[in-house]
Amino acid sequence: MKNLFTLLAILLVSFTSCKEHSEKKSENEKTEIIKPLMDFEDLISDYNKWWSYHYHKISLSSEFDALNEKSEKITKDEFLKKLTSGNFITIEMQSNDISKTYKLFELPKDLDNPISSTIKNVSYQDYKFFKMEGTEFPDFNVVDINGIVYNNEKLKGKTTVIKTWFIACKPCVAEMPELNEFVKKYKNEERIQFVSLALDTKPLLLDFLQKQEFEYAVIGEQKELIQDKLNLTAYPTHLVVNEQGDISKVFNKASELISYIEKDATLKKSEQKKLSPPPPLPPAPIEK
């Protein structure tokens, strides 16, 4: 009996030690995951510093793991919806995972700069873009400046990249050289097409395109489709429509669009490489 009690005591100590080690390990991993890559107090002390960080380093249209202000995991929907209150900013966290981790940090109520109002406005747009994902592209039937018809049927079977713009929009025009290189890179890929919806009339667009190269198909006078059907008011806006005619992603920046498409193409190529080659043909019968 004495030996039995001794054995039970040893097992209990071992279990407690393992449990403590496991808990400490979990706590250490949690500490590593929730460490911010930027200092919150320093970031919010200067409006321009925060905006530069948010614009260049935070991509809310990308896939990321979302944490609330208490470091609890939440959905992307909940994360973006909280941002629209104007009470939080986003900071990227150090993570051992491949995917990005973003966390909400609550702004002080007496903050003496316009970070709160700015994040409220831009987050509303980010949340709207997120809610567009998975929805069907609205009915349309239009003709580009070269007489080619585009409609919902034309979207089927291809990935369609769409840009909304107008001639007087400086950011819209500034990104065209980058987009031209992007289009040229995929010019031999039949399963992707590039279409732009502009506000301007055909004569104005033809005159503009004599001075400025733009490799997208150009369709003019599309205010109704852009603003009424798609409910878009920011220019430029980039949409990716999948082969079924549904909206996959919506972006404001060309860089985010390009990164998304190229990542998708890389995945498809890597998947193709893993496929087994077809079996060899059986040998021809030997004639006797």
Image (cartoon, grey):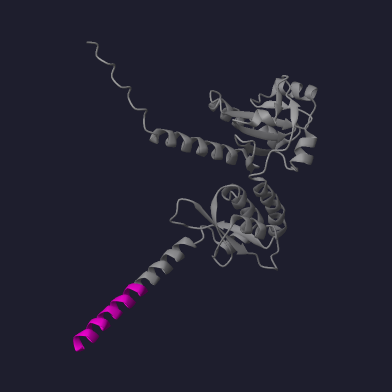
Residue 175 seen in render? no
Percent position of residue 56, x then y: 59, 47
| Quarter that holds the C terminus | top left
Please tell me whether residue 88 is drawn above or below residue 155 in the rendered image.
below
| Quarter that holds the N terminus | bottom left
Residue in view at x 22 percent, y 84 percent: 4
The one of 160 and 208 positioned closer to us in this rendering: 160
Percent position of residue 220, x then y: 76, 28
- Magenta range is 1-20
Give left or right: position of 122 versus 69. right
Residue in view at x 56 percent, y 49 percent: 57
**Residue farthest to the left, as pictured:** 3
Residue 246 seen in render? yes
The one of 49 and 186 positioned closer to us in this rendering: 186
Residue in view at x 76 percent, y 36 percent: 225
Please tell me whether residue 100 is drawn above or below residue 221 in the rendered image.
below
Q: Is 252 included in the stretch rendered in magenta?
A: no
Q: Main secondary structure of the magenta part?
A: helix
Percent position of residue 135, x then y: 67, 43
Please tell me whether residue 13 is drawn above or below residue 216 in the rendered image.
below
Q: Is 6 included in the stretch rendered in magenta?
A: yes
Percent position of residue 19, x then y: 36, 73
